[in-house]
Amino acid sequence: MQVDKIKGHQTDQLIEAVLALKDKEEAYRFFDDLCTISELQSLSQRLEVAHMLRMKKTYEKIKNETGASTATISRVRRCLNYGNDGYDEMLERLYPDEKPFELRKD
């Protein structure tokens, strides 16, 4: 698990801070202070790529709609297929009525 490589006081502090956010406006302020615009856009883009992959959108459609590179799309797909199910857990909470297509777990 890659997460084991980053566990520690600093990462724990970041995770606790995110969990302590009370609402969307507070989250916007926190992430505006914490991240550059580019970093926040990259994180947001990856989540949207994961959402589109779960809905079986093509790489071309994802690239055109999100601006993500094929390398980013491939990395997100690898996380969906072989990761810790973090994307799936969050996307199921964000879109509980959507029925994602099964991704192949090669």
Image (spheres, rainbow, N blue to C red):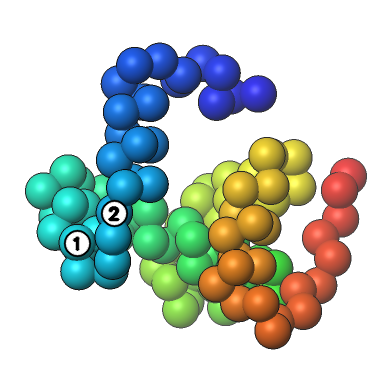
The residue nearer to you, when weighing 89 against 100, is 89
Work out whether residue 98 can be spotted: yes
Query: Which labelled disc corresponds to residue 26?
Result: 1
| Element marked by disc 2 | loop
The residue nearer to you, when weighing 29 against 74, is 29
Q: Which residue is mark 2?
A: 21
Direction from residue 66 to residue 105 in the image, left or right:
right
**Residue at the image position 28 percent from the left and 60 percent from the top:** 22
* Rendering coords of residue 19 (x, y %): 38, 47
Direction from residue 1 to residue 40 in the image, left or right:
left
Q: Tell me whether circle 2 and circle 1 mark residues in contact (CB < 8 Å).
A: yes
Quarter holding residue 82: top right
Query: Which labelled disc corresponds to residue 11?
Result: none
* Rendering coords of residue 75 (x, y %): 58, 45
The residue nearer to you, when weighing 76 against 4, is 4
| Element marked by disc 1 | helix
Q: Is 14 above or below relative to 89?
A: above
**Residue at the image position 60 percent from the left and 77 percent from the top:** 95
Q: Is 66 above or below relative to 32?
A: below
Distance (Cα) linking label 2 and label 1: 6 Å
* Rendering coords of residue 15 (x, y %): 38, 36
Work out whether residue 56 can be spotted: no
Within-10-Å neighbours for mark 2: few <14, some 14–19, many 20+ = few
Direction from residue 44 to residue 47 in the image, left or right:
right
